[in-house]
Image: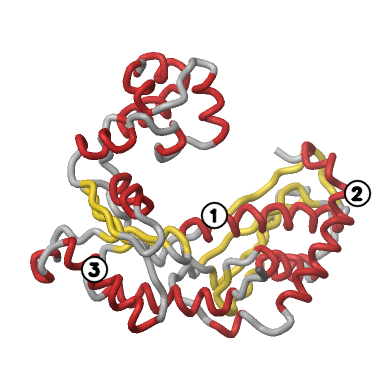
Amino acid sequence: MHPNMGKYETASKLVHQIWADYTDICEYVSLDEGFLDVTDSADRFGGAKAISHEIKRRTREEIGLTCSVGVGYSMMAAKLASEEKKPDGFFEILTPADLQALILDRSVRVIYGVGPKTAEELKRLGITTVRQICENPLGVEALLGSHGKQIVKLAQGIDRRRVTVYTEAKSIGTEQTFQQDTMDFDYLKYILFLDAQKLSADIQQRGVYAQTVTLKITYGDMKQITRSKTGDATAQAADIYETAAALLDKIEKRPIRLIGISLSGLTPNIQLSLFDPDKKRKQDRLRETMLKLQAKYGDKEKDCT
């Protein structure tokens, strides 16, 4: 089905408002997912289980949607519990022993941080299940280093991560330094497009939106400049790219050594004016332009460091 981001983000904002009634320690993972730490507030509402059922009830009655809720002693336990009885489910994992009993014979992919690449590496050790991680912890650690140690701890039910409250002051960015100065502004826009994709994925993973896009330039003589534009909050690569590209069009045209984008004014709040009727047409036009640039410059990305 074609997505309707305006509706998704409206619903997301309403759900976040419900969560905020039970704790101010919320970590948004995406539009439709998040962690709530109710350690200090649970007693006021009859316990974590009661809060879960109340969130499910209010989400259905006030927004018209179903949701699955998991209660856990840790972030990983809560995440797995939320997935156990989908759709519209509820599940609890209250101790490390409960978690291990649930996942021991499941694929290693159930462990937080084990993606396709890591799973393939573990498979070379003959490890495909959580039980096999627990049976060969030294092998996992030797293969994957500090990442392996974390995987072993999670397989044992040990997860000391804490719910991280969103901090508005944060900003994120990425930049590319060229091995040789360039005045190819079409190529520079291609690099901006790649950077915009990376930043879009990052802030969508965090469940936040950026209000300010800043273009950073270092010329061949090492003079640095920045240009910024603040507007409606967005998490879309197309919006980030078009803003940065427009800023690039306005700068002095001379050899460039470094180019980058940073996003600031990060906010979990949603401004619906972003989602105008021309959004799909604009994204289609952008995709067509970028395919042409990719065909022309795709092999030149290695010229950046």
Residue occupying the point 28% across, 39% down: 159
Position in image of residue 147 (x %, y %) = 42, 29
Foreground: 293 or 173? 293
Hey, what amino acid is under mark 1? Asp
Local crowd size for mark 1, using a 10 Å CA cut-off: few (<14), some (14–19), many (≥20): some
* Distance in Å between CA atoms under marks 1 and 2: 26 Å
Q: How is the image coloured?
A: secondary structure
Hey, what amino acid is under mark 3? His
Local crowd size for mark 3, using a 10 Å CA cut-off: few (<14), some (14–19), many (≥20): some
- Asked whether, in this view, residue 230 is left or right of residue 184, the answer is left
- Mark drawn on residue 202: 1
Foreground: 25 or 67? 67
* Label 3: which secondary element: helix
Foreground: 67 or 187? 67
Q: Which residue is mark 3?
A: 53
Residue occupying the point 55% across, 83% down: 272
